[in-house]
């Protein structure tokens, strides 16, 4: 047996074992949620749901993809990489398809990196753009979650006991990047001067200067991040009313921020079960009925399937140009070329 084969087999085995474990955890989490639901009430809520509002919610999801593609385009432009909005939107739809139908093998972010990296000489910039687009979105949501948590804490005398710890985490994560910006230039210069500092990391640190040189564009991207989440929360609030789960915007933003953080934990397939369960239990703690929150998650998952099918059509169109094996294997030549 060759050395390459002998090392590839354990990696493949570990990958499959991890997928099996995540699958079992996903099934367990979903089972716990399903068992606790009152399916007579859920079916009644489904029959009485406002179809017009559901249509508006799906239109909101389509709009969210458009906003995300526009933001991605703006980040790429900072690094001197230019794609048309239509092209990036098509890639974004396909990434949604990859996230929902191939969660154990290829993430949507990896697909987006693949499509932009292979067509650009500035490969590090293409990778950094996807990372920046993702991180600024997470930071903006946490900042909104901090505001929502403060409003819940001061408006609800019977707020849950976990509000204060959540506020501490949200506030720390929100303020830390702002504090680091003050010292970042000196820290980057110090790292770049170190002779033994890895060259790949130096290349990444050098890209941070792009954001300093285009400070207005960077602020624009942060603004888009906040706008995207407020837009998403608006259609989620409409969905809550459509299924009879009345709540407030500040409670919803707190619950949405917490469930997104939970979904980042690599415990289930694509966050299924973690995202849904944390949203259901948090919103139930914040006054929404368990069944209404469960109904919201069921509708969102169903609409995500429809959204993913749109991406699947784009993937069928572009699949001849997509090297799926290279994206699955992080040791493939494709990734070695990105160094």
Image (tube, helix red, strand yellow):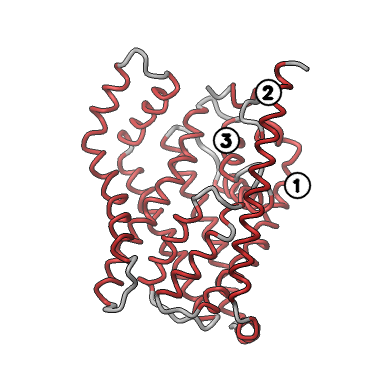
| Depth order, front residue of 128/157 | 157
Q: Earlier in the sequence, mark 2 or mark 1?
A: 2
- The residues tagged by marks 2 and 1 sit, at their Cα atoms, a distance apart of 33 Å
- Residue 323 visible in the displayed image: no
- Residue 15: give x, y in percent of width and height: 66, 38
The residue located at (49%, 76%) in the rendering is: 238
Q: Secondary structure at mark 3?
A: helix
Pointer 2: what residue? 7
Q: Residue at x 67, y 61 (%)?
A: 305
83 in relation to 1, above or below: below
* Crowd class of label 3 (few under 14; some 14 to 19; many from 20; radius 10 Å): many
Which residue lies under the disc numbered 3?
Answer: 116
| Left or right of 307 in this view: 245 | left
Mark 3 → mark 1, Cα distance in angstroms = 18 Å
The mark nearer the N terminus, 3 or 2, is: 2
- Using the image, tell me which numbered label, if any, was put on residue 159: none
Residue at the image position 36 percent from the left and 53 percent from the top: 223
Q: Which residue is tagged 1?
A: 316
Give the side of residue 202 with respect to residue 339, left or right: left
Q: Single out the mark in the foreground, 3 or 2.
A: 2
Q: Position of residue 7 (x, y in %)?
A: 68, 23
Dot 1: element:
helix
Dot 3 and dot 2 residues touching (CB under 8 Å): no
Q: Residue furthest top?
A: 195
Is residue 229 left or right of 18 when viewed as pictured?
left
Residue 217: x and y in percent read: 35, 43
The residue under the point 69% across, 40% down is 16
Q: In the image shown, does 15 or 257 lie closer to the viewer?
A: 15
Q: Are marks 3 and 1 in contact (CB under 8 Å)?
A: no
Q: Position of residue 159 (x, y in %)?
A: 32, 74
């Amino acid at each position: 047996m060759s050395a390459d084969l002998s090392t590839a087999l354990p990696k493949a085995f570990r990958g499959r074992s991890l997928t099996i474990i995540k699958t079992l955890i996903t099934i367990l989490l979903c089972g716990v949620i399903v068992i606790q639901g009152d399916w007579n009430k859920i079916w009644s809520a489904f029959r009485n749901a406002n179809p017009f509002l559901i249509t508006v919610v799906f239109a909101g999801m389509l709009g969210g993809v458009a906003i995300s593609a526009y933001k991605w385009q703006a980040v790429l432009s900072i690094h001197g990489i230019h794609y048309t909005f239509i092209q990036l939107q098509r890639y974004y739809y396909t990434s949604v398809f990859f996230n929902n139908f191939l969660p154990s093998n290829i993430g949507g972010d990896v697909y987006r990196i693949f499509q932009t990296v292979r067509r650009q000489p500035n490969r590090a910039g293409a990778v950094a753009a996807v990372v920046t687009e993702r991180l600024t979105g997470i930071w903006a949501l946490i900042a909104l979650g901090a505001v929502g948590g403060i409003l819940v804490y001061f408006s609800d005398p019977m707020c849950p006991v976990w509000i204060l710890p959540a506020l501490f985490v949200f506030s720390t994560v929100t303020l830390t990047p702002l504090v680091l910006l003050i010292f970042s230039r000196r820290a980057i210069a110090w790292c770049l001067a170190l002779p033994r500092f890895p060259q790949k990391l130096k290349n990444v640190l050098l890209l941070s200067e792009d954001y300093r040189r285009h400070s207005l564009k960077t602020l624009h991207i942060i603004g888009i991040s906040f706008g995207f989440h407020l837009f998403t929360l608006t259609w989620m609030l409409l969905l809550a009313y459509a299924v009879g789960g009345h709540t407030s915007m500040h409670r919803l933003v707190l619950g949405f921020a917490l469930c997104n953080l939970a979904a980042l934990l690599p415990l289930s397939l694509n966050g299924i079960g973690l995202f849904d369960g944390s949203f259901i239990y948090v919103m139930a703690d914040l006054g929404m009925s368990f069944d209404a929150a469960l109904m919201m998650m069921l509708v969102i998952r169903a609409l995500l399937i429809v959204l993913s099918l749109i991406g699947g059509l784009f993937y069928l169109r572009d699949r001849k140009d997509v090297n799926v094996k290279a994206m699955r294997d992080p040791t493939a030549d494709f990734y070695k070329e990105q160094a």
